[in-house]
Amino acid sequence: MKRAACALALTTLTLGCAMVSAPVIPPVALVQTYQAPLDLDHQETQLGSKRGTSEAKTILGVVTWGDAGTHAAAQAGGISTIRSADYEFFTVLGVYSKYTTIVYGD
């Protein structure tokens, strides 16, 4: 019983560290992947003809690398005018997480 309680506490603490703040936040799961818009004016959204992505990864929230900024995503897609942006988040038990920024534009 103590092992189960310790495992539950560790999982809860780990997942709490892996959460992100964005316009759409799904419920917590042990393995999850989701994509959602970063902009809030959906009626005004224009995608443009190009798409670029950038990403940052982390292990246990201790070691992090990458650039998930909109500027890096625009550069990767050859975009000079960003028209819309989405994000994608993937995590496994809060041990490994990847945050991807997706921009659309011309």
Image (tube, rainbow, N blue to C red):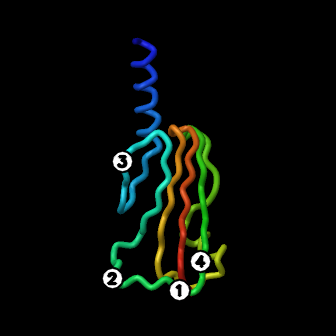
Residue 48 numbered tag: 1
At a point 49% along the width and 83% down the height, the residue shown is 47
Observer-nearest residue: 20 or 35? 35
* Distance Cα–Cα, label 3 vs label 1: 31 Å
Mark 3–mark 4 Cα distance, whole angstroms, equals 28 Å
At label 2, which amino acid type do we have? Gln
* Res 9 quadrant in image: top left
The residue beneath circle 3 is 27
Labels 2 and 4: the sequence-earlier one: 2
- Few, some or many residues within 10 Å of mark 4 (<14, 14–19, 20+): many
Q: Position of residue 18 (x, y in %)?
A: 47, 44
Structural distance between the alpha carbons of marks 2 and 1 = 15 Å
The residue that mark 4 highlights is: 51
* Residue indicated by mark 2: 43
The x and y percentages for residue 55 are: 60, 60
Cβ–Cβ below 8 Å for labels 2 and 1?
Answer: no
Count the labels in the image.
4
The amino acid pointed to by label 4 is: Arg
Q: Residues within 10 Å of mark 2 (few under 14, many from 20)?
A: few
In this rendering, the answer to whether 11 lies above or below 100 is above
